[in-house]
Amino acid sequence: MKPMGPIPDAFAASDGELVIGGRKASDLAAEGTPLFVYSRTMLDARAAELRAAMPDRLAIHYAMKANPFPPLLAHMAGLVDGFDVASAGEMRLALDAGMAAGAISFAGPGKDDPELEAAIAARITLNTESASEIRRALAAGDRLGIAPRLAIRVNPSFDIKGSGMKMGGGAKPFGIDADLVPSLAREIAASGAEWRGFHIYAGSQALDAQAVIATQAATLALAGDLAERAGVDVPHCNLGGGFGIPYFPGDTPLDIGQVGSALAEAFAALPDRLANTHFAIELGRYLVGEAGVYLTRVIDVKESHGEIFAVTDGGLHHQLAASGNFGTVVRRNYPVAVAGRLGEPPVEREQTIVGRLCTPLDLLANKVALPEIQPGDLVAIFCAGAYGASASPAAFLGHGPAREVLV
């Protein structure tokens, strides 16, 4: 048997059946599977828990690349202080969700001129990622007769130790190398544009509080140094994110109490150039990841060379991350359950859950210990609230997208 990751504690059962947002899984699936289900209650609880742990001075932004489902965005707009987007499409969704333009920032290394113009016209902050982009944004502002709101995304020399995806340190397509930043900050400040400060993002999916604390300390030190060298104050500084969630066997939750306490101490000892800075963190999966469940129905159960395979109507075309094909080096099992038989003991034979696609990559749970899976059963894959529907190749083999619901 191969172990699975931990099912989030907030999920409950009624008569042995998984309940999500107060509704039984079978009721949610009655209109068809596969589907993603997102719990408002869990979104609310996570946001409240984070607010309580972080310093009052810190704004919380939602990195909407994690999940851009419009009803979820509209709900998140009431829970956070801002949205961070990475395309003109996400920008439109953010505005449609009710987020104020002044609370939206736009990052990404490949912004084209129409995207720059759309952001400038909407008065959205551009986190610029090269000297060329800065100058194209200034030219776009001249064409529109609008002073653009410009920050610099900094490529720091460090990353978050143990992070799942490193966004800083060494050569990267993201941001501007730190040694080039002071002169460009002065150029923006002198250009007539609205200087908005720094965006410094070092990595993602970190579960080690001490690693996050060390990275935030290094980020604050870097922001202060860059501001001093540039001779400019910093109106806003996005400290990045990186808070992870437990996906795999052995993972333990990030201690955000430790992180918040350390950040409060750091805020109490800021250099003069950062004394009046507005700080924010941007989080995606930490806010929404554990609030989502992917439900898929078993079509067939078969045996091959002594191994049991449960074939579902879902697959990697909806849940690329759970299949192990979204950035993981070694495939490990997400938390999985038979939704209608929670609490039942597992059978002695290991079972493998696969999707319906004609590829050996379509593996949802490998050799796991579960109650005996039967055709018609609902399989629940947890931690599906982030990088699921929108980050998976839904058009692959033509089975179509999964439904999404917010309950």
Image (spheres, helix red, strand yellow):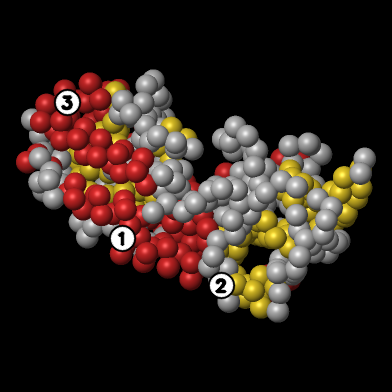
Q: Which mark is residue 182?
A: 3
Horizontal relation, residue 296 to residue 105: left or right: right
* Residue drawn at point x = 21 percent, y = 26 percent: 181
Q: Is residue 261 above or below residue 132?
A: below
Residue 379 screen position, x and y as percent? 73, 60
Q: Earlier in the sequence, mark 3 or mark 2?
A: 2
Tell me the distance, in whole angstroms, between the alpha carbons under discs 3 and 2: 49 Å
Q: For the residue marked with disc 3, what is the amino acid? A: Pro
Cβ–Cβ under 8 Å for marks 3 and 2: no
Q: Can you tell which quarter of the image residue 257 is in?
A: bottom left
Q: Is residue 251 above or below residue 360?
A: below
The secondary element bearing badge 2 is classed as loop
Cβ–Cβ under 8 Å for marks 3 and 1: no
Tell me the distance, in whole angstroms, between the alpha carbons under discs 2 and 1: 24 Å
Give the residue at mark 1.
53
Q: Earlier in the sequence, mark 2 or mark 1?
A: 2
Q: Which mark is residue 21?
A: 2
